[in-house]
Amino acid sequence: MGKIFTEINDAHRTFIQQQHLFFVASAPLAADGHVNLSPKGLDCFRVLSPGLVGYSDMTGSGNETAAHILENQRITFMFCAFDGPPMILRLYGSGQLVLPGTPEWAEYSPQFPLYTGTRQLILARIYAVQTSCGFAVPLYDYKADRDVLHKWADNRGPEGLATYRAEKNQISLDGLPTH
């Protein structure tokens, strides 16, 4: 089962900051709903305090995490060591969407990289941190971040991104609203 902590300590923060990839999991309340698990990169994750984290969420093909947070706030983050000593770290939390133009956006957005395709911030109040061995996680060498998403967003521009989000990011796979 690993060790359980009630907040992010300095060693956890350091481990998180060293990772180039993390995963976000969320799910609707419906028993037949789709569990969402998304990989994230691009240096977008921040530990804001021992009990608060967040990431700059880019426009993508769906917006499942937002829909699930609006319905039930449950969110889990997972970080794996793909180099160095093995470890898996999970953060269990209660999520919140922070949208451009809100007072929360003005408060939190300066702490995140904001790319052309950033559509929102996902924040989470962390109530449990779990570490486990990670002995079976393979070793990989990090080469670089991909620039495809940045180029795609830059080519669309603000109006094109707004149109894309209106067409593709308003309803989850399970029919839940995303905003």
Image: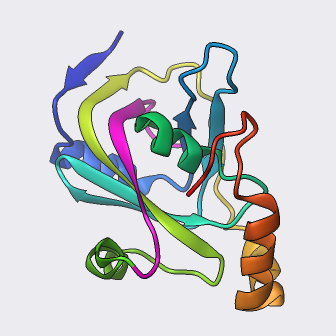
Tell me residue 155's x, y (percent).
Answer: 83, 88
**Residue name at image x 75 percent, y 79 percent:** 161
**Relative to 26, is 99 on the left or the right?**
left
The answer to whether residue 81 is seen in the rendering is no
* Occupied quadrant, residue 85: top left
Q: Quadrant of the N terminus?
A: top left
Q: Is residue 129 magenta?
A: no
Q: Is residue 49 above or below residue 2?
A: below
Q: Quadrant of the C terminus?
A: bottom right
Tell me residue 78's x, y (percent).
Answer: 47, 36
Q: Is residue 114 above or below residue 24?
A: below
In this orientation, which residue lies closer to the viewer: 28 or 122? 28
**Residue name at image x 70 percent, y 57 percent:** 170
- Chain part drawn in magenta: 79-101
**Relative to 77, is 171 on the left or the right?**
right
* Occupied quadrant, residue 146: bottom right
Tell me residue 20's x, y (percent).
Answer: 54, 56
**Residue name at image x 42 percent, y 82 percent:** 101
The answer to whether residue 126 is seen in the rendering is yes
